[in-house]
Image: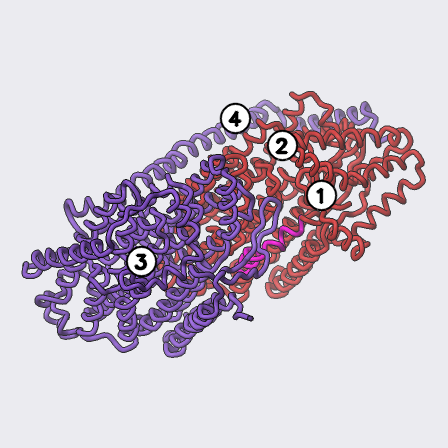
Amino acid sequence: MTHLPLWLIPLFPLIGTILLGTVAVISSPSKKGAPEGIVGALAVLFPAFSFAVVAILACSMPEAGLRETLCNWIDIPLFRADIGFLFDGLSRIMLLFVTGIGTLIALYSIGYMHGDRGFARFFAYINLFLFSMIVLVLSDSLLLTFLGWEGVGLCSYLLIGFWNSDLNNCKAANKAFIVNRVGDIGFILGMLCLVTLGGSSLLNYDSLAAFIQMIISGNHLVDVIIPLSLAGVLFFIGCTGKSAQIPLLTWLPDAMAGPTPVSALIHAATMVTSGVYLLARLGSMFAVLPQVLTIIVVVGMLTAFWAAVSGLFQNDIKKVLAYSTISQLGYMFMAAGVCAFDASIFHVFTHAFFKAALFLGAGAVIHALAGEQDMRKMGGMLRKTPVTACVMIFAFFAIIGFPGFAGFWSKDLILERLYTSGPMGPFFYFIGLATAVITAIYMGRLIIMTFFGKYRGSKESEEHIHEAPAAMLIPMVVLTFGSVFAGYLWADMIGLTFFRDSLASVVGTAQAIYAGSHVAAHVSPVLFAALGTIAALLGMFIAWKVWGNARIPEAKGSSAPEGFKADWTFFWDKIHAFFIMIVNVLAWICDVVVDKILQAAQWTLGAIATILGDGATVFQVRKARLQAALSVAGLAVLVLVVLLTGGLV
Amino acid sequence: MLLHLLVFAPFVAAMLMVVNSKEDFKSSSRMALLFGIAFVAMSVVLIALGNQATTPMEWFRIPGCKGPVFYYLYAHGLGAWMVFLSCGLSLVALISARASMGKEYRNFAIGIFALMGAMNGTFLAADAVLFFFFFEAMVIPAAILIAAFGGEKRKEAAMTFAIYTLVGSAPMAVALWYLLTMADNSLLLSLALVLQSLPEGTQMMVLVSFLLAFLVKTPIFPFHGWQAITYSEAPAPLSAILTGAMSKAGVFGFIAWILPIFPLTMGVVRTMMWLGLATAVYGALMALRANDGKKLLAFSSMSHLGIAVAGVFSLSEAMLPAVLVLLVAHGISAGVQYFLMGVGERMTGTRNINEMGGLAHQNPVFSFLFGAAGVMALAVPGTAGFIGEFTVLLSLWDMGPFQALIMGFTMILSAGYVLRFIQKVIFGKKAREYEEGARTTALEGSAFGVMLVLLLVFGFHPACITNSLQLFDEAAVESMAATTDGANGQTASDAEAATAGEDSAEAAVEAAPMTAEEIAQLDSTLAAAGFSEADRKDIINQMIAEEGAAAETPAAETAPEAAAAPATEAAPATVETSKTEGSNND
């Protein structure tokens, strides 16, 4: 049976990038810019094609997956890499929602970016992003994944700094790129670690899995555990960068400076989850590294809790969602840390729907309020923008894990896996549950402050509030359906395990390895579900009590948190600032101390030479005569040397 | 023939340029462009044809030396790519200078052609004296160009540049002369042989004098005093050539002359590698603080070349292709950045990046190119820079994770300074009011565009570069022997013809051509037996020495000149292949 070639999937967005980029550059000098209709159509069409190809392939994919080697990439002594693609259960799910949500958000952006000067440029970046993201999840080796990995980072940089005449946006973009670079270096070094361990073929996922299998069956684990653990930690550093985990998480809240569709697509639904994807992809490697897994679960737990508390303190609607994203990513890492890769990918999947819906809803609110992002100046939007409000409220139920909604199934699953993971399980479970309560509180606060109560903005702005255009509403509604029903792909309680089965061929082995070394306690799943429901209801209740009828303090100055709230929120920024300071001091030493010393030495030498030269001119009585004498002497010496050494004979 | 053309035709072109009237900008610029395009075409053909050499001709005899100095050109993958950089960047410089030079254009073009000829000579010379001659000759046109067309402090910059680099290579001249008094001739193998016979202390002295010349040229910390002022005061198109092509002469010297001649001790290797890494970090830190755009680029160049030198002295098997890709990528990306900075300076009238800004709205095409060039300098995967840096990092990781970590640190810093540079120049708002100068012309813009596309092409298909080093591969050798009987076959047959009459020299001739293959075989057996890189090198060097000595003794009695030529013909080839397993078939 023949299949569509895999390279078609990334090809479409690539063509889109090139076309739209050309349009953007060519139309840039003209006053009007390119016609939005054509540009918008192109921008949505190419991702949609790509989605169609993925959908066709997804239906006809054999159990073992499709593999395709395109060509050779690097071939030098010691190192060889091919460009090849791998389409299996894991990449199928990732690709489906990356291209699907990508298409929807491109459609939404047509409405959102209407009238912007950089319309074509924006969509060129979006297409480039989709290309990179597709390469990231479709590649069959770590090196090609890294191409996508840095590619999405680059697009994130370009899109955060999209409105580049404001330097604050540029700084946020720079921060995102540089912090990600730190993680990327971890990724590169991790690859090198693997290459030294077993040659460049280990970068291929299949070979790596086979290698691990060989080690286990041959009982050689003890010999390689150190380099392998090192590689694991380095890859995990890469993941913390891309997926905004402690300690490299400071860039994500700042990244909200970009246009809101970008926040929805890149900084919530797709790019930031690539760290989780990588962990799942390398599952068989992580499964044999218990120490690294412990690090992952602890980091994930701390991040989830810390970010959830930060979310409570924010006034900017997008910042709340940003911290909520970090917190949810923490959940996914916790799941990955107990080797529940299918559960973590399931949460990636459901999260993509409800978080994208939340962001798009927030975008619609911001759009309606002409750019206002401070929740203290909102309120009572329920009556003015009813569709948006419904979308956000449904997505809200999904994220807090209200029974029946998508988040309920996936979060419940993660908590269950945490509890049964081992002796420390109940502790992780408890923190996870507490975080769930906080999640419900801050999300409840967001909904209450935005949609309920009275409108708190200025009178003039109230008149201009309008519901978003259809191009924006359609994607939002589709995503809302996703955030309600996506969970039923894997609802253990009612016997639906489609999602788990489709991933089993990829992560099943890894999880089996892990499960073999851990004794699982058995607890009734209904109990977990009940506790999860109570957590969500409790959080909602607290939020209603605190903010339901309270007078919201007057908005003054910036929307950034103050006092102890700022200390908590910017804790990691301060740690980063410390490292930046060290670098700056080093640079200062180089510039002001070392360089000046070198210059002084150079000057001294030069001065001595000049003085000697001057001395010679002073001593000579008549310049010309001395020169002539020296020349004659020099010539004589030369001739002498020649004769003595027997040259010119 | 191609080799001769590449070295001498630029000088002829420079002379022909004089024919043009100074007043007639159009004809002189057209002529310069035509010449430039012809040279680029020749350099591409040179790469495509692979390894080749000219017939060695006796050039002159240095008084006091045993053997003659040859005029002998030789192209291998590394040199050919460097020639490509020198020709390509010169062409773009000629294009870019059209907008700013005006009536001075003719003189500028003359200088550029002279510089190009000297650079090509440096990269193609197979004779040490010839190499040294061109290595020094490069400085003169460059210094004159700086003094004539530079910025405010051009005189000072030209003086610093000329004196610093000339003084830096003076010890090399002495050391070379010292070696030549004992060597049979000034080709690579005889130098290596002579050096083996010296006591260790003297070897060290000679090594240090050689190293110094290349350290200054690259430049490596702490010998970089000339670099920032020179690059910033030179006209931007010239800076692009200086950093993109001329500074490569230093790294080229390490690979093509230091490694084959000297039996390096581990101490020297480690010192050089750490110097390279120190340069990388130092350059990156200085770039973080620089406010002069061209100085920033100068320090960034310094940082990248530091990485290249560290890579060279990692001496891993992957070193040569890795460093070559890094050099080519850096040559193109640093070159295009300098060109664009020149355009920026032309438009805004300042080099201070704090006084620029807002160009993204004012001139989107320029900003697109500028941003793309910056991003490509960051070694994002998919660009040639990534291949280079990744493979060099791989070589360094072999030496130790700590070294790799330091290089990783510079890669993070590079993101810091490049993004700051982009932000200050094209983003934000206009920092001050000024009268806008000439914008990017269409020709200029497309030339920069081609350079950026080249970076992408090499990034996805680095085989174009790395394959030029793999001609040792048997299939490639056979196909080359079949198709290009001219270039390689000629030298061999010439050599045979020269020695056919000499009965006693026959043995020598037979010994020499065998070595290339034998050594590779030997090397792989040794590698399989578990010898380290350095050990293998030593053993092979010994083998060469013995064989060479055996070949030379009978020959030296009867026909010293005739025998010397064929025996040493294989010299650059054999020694280099033994080191890198990748270069030549003679």
Which badge, 4 or 3, is on the more N-terminal residue? 3
Give the residue pinned by disc 3: A347
Give the residue pinned by disc 4: A608
Which chain can be seen in red? B
Q: Can residue B195 be seen at all in this image of the molecule? A: yes
Chain letter for mark 4: A
Answer with the quarter of the image where residue A593 lies. top left
Quick one: label 2, few (<14), some, or many (20+) residues within 10 Å?
few
Residue A276 percent coordinates (x, y)? 37, 53
Q: Which residues are magenta?
A: B451-469
The amino acid type, in three-letter code, at marker 3 is His
Q: Vertical placement of A365 versus A609: above or below?
A: below
> What is the distance, in whole Å, between disc 1 and disc 3 at their CAs?
63 Å
> What is the distance, in whole Å, between disc 4 and disc 3 at their CAs?
73 Å
Give the residue pinned by disc 1: B125
Residue B576 percent coordinates (x, y)? 69, 39
